[in-house]
Amino acid sequence: MPYIQTFVSKSLKWLDLNPSDQPVALNVALGKHGGDRKSKKFQAKDQVRVTKLKSGTMTTDYLLARLARDHPGILSAYERGEFKSVRAATITAEIIKLKSPLDCLRADWRKASQSERVIAQSSLDV
């Protein structure tokens, strides 16, 4: 929550400094893939970060921004109500990748102790 409060307070401060007659959308920005890496502006020490979302978090805002950037068709389908949730839309877009039962079994098997493996193997023997 501190991030959201900081974002909102900075946005309101910007609006105070830049008044406008038109309504201003406070959409959360998500950067483009790649981008400028060689110009003087990029290499400047005082460069301001454009992305407002913390990458790697699976918040609704982040997922919606990813859909808007990478899969606008799926985003419009979500907005029409074709998906029950943002998560369902992002699974369809393969932003969230579900593990198969075999992948889960392999991960759990690696974590199991030797005695747990013996018990599991004996319960699988038919």
Image: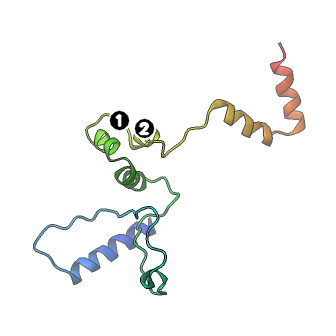
User: Looking at numbered disc 2 in the image, what kind of residue is underneath it?
Assistant: Ala
**Separation of marks 2 and 1 at Cα, in angstroms:** 6 Å
Question: Which residue corresponds to mark 2?
Answer: 88
Which quarter of the picture shows residue 125? top right
Determine whether 118 is above or below 57 in the image.
above
Nearest the viewer among 84 and 69 is 69
Confirm or deny contact between disc 2 and disc 1 (CB under 8 A): yes
The residue located at (82%, 20%) in the rendering is 123
Q: Horizontal placement of 19 versus 86: left or right? A: left
Query: Quadrant where the N terminus lies?
Result: bottom left
Kindly identify which numbered label has been placed on residue 66.
none
Which quarter of the picture shows residue 8? bottom left
**Disc 1 residue crowd, few under 14, some 14–19, many 20+, Cα 10 Å:** some
The earlier-in-sequence mark between 2 and 1 is 1
Q: Secondary structure at mark 2?
A: helix
Which quarter of the picture shows residue 33? bottom left
User: Looking at numbered disc 1 in the image, what kind of residue is underneath it?
Assistant: Phe
Query: Quadrant where the C terminus lies?
Result: top right
Question: Which residue corresponds to mark 1?
Answer: 83
